[in-house]
Amino acid sequence: MKVGTDGVLLGAWCSVEDFPDTILDVGSGTGVVSLMIAQRSDAMTIDAVEIDENAYEQTVANFEESDWGDRLYCYNATFQEFADEIAEEEETYDLIVSNPPFYTDNFETNDEARNKARFTTSLSFEELLLGVSKILSASGKFSTIIPFREEENFIALAKEKQLFLNKICRIKGNPTSEIKRILLEFSFKENNIIEENLTIEIERHQYTEAYINLTKDFYLKM
């Protein structure tokens, strides 16, 4: 699994201002989002759940080699099973983040691991939001990144689970490109929605000041 821009954006953008004690990363991939949040916060419990065994092993290895290994733990399970088990134990998370699978069946490849990581057949938006609604604390926040075309659908599905949009950031690759991704933050409380826009590059490999300010703590060269 490559470290993609989506994960970097989510790990840098999600709010830790409320000092969450317990954090969950759904679909960890390489573990980059969890690692970024560990760098940004003092949370003592940062869990991750990953269905693909190879990705799970990569996450575990990256956790162990990091400076925050004592606060990071990854489970090899489906999110549905994990959420049900956590809910049974009546435990919750103050912050849940997910860079979820989002392509449809039409684009599936012959690479099963990549399919699991990138296709909604392994974890639909409905299943993701249902699981989040079961194990997010009453004052907790859920942050995710999805394709722009899914904005209305995802927000409507979240509302059905009593998860209300609090913050949105629409992302463009460059000033002339279309909006491709959106970062979303939800909670169980209805608030005035904060709307932001972010452009990543002025031109190829020339990053905007806003993107540099958001992500510079996580790049060796920026």
Image: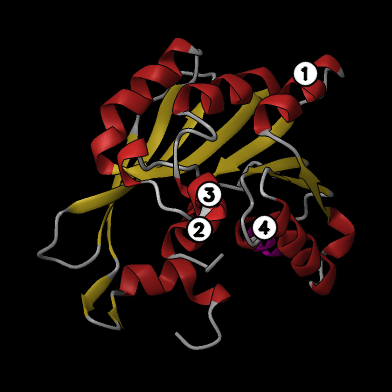
Q: Under tag 1, what secondary structure?
A: helix
Q: Cβ–Cβ below 8 Å for labels 1 and 4?
A: no
Disc 4 or 3, which lies upstream in sequence?
Answer: 4
Q: Cβ–Cβ below 8 Å for labels 4 and 3?
A: yes
Q: Residue at x 9, y 64 (%)?
A: 176
Mark 3 or mark 1, which is nearer to you?
Answer: 3
| Nearer to us in this view, 218 or 196 | 218
Residue 55: give its label. 4
Q: CA distance from mark 4 to mark 3?
A: 9 Å
Q: CA distance from mark 2 to mark 3?
A: 12 Å
Task: Report the span colored magenta.
Answer: 35-41
Image position, residue 98 (x, y; %)? 55, 43
Residue position marked by numbered label 2 in the rendering: 7
Q: Cβ–Cβ below 8 Å for labels 3 and 1?
A: no
Asked if residue 82 lies left or right of residue 128, the reply is right
Q: Under tag 2, what secondary structure?
A: helix
Q: Residues within 10 Å of mark 4 (few under 14, many from 20)?
A: many
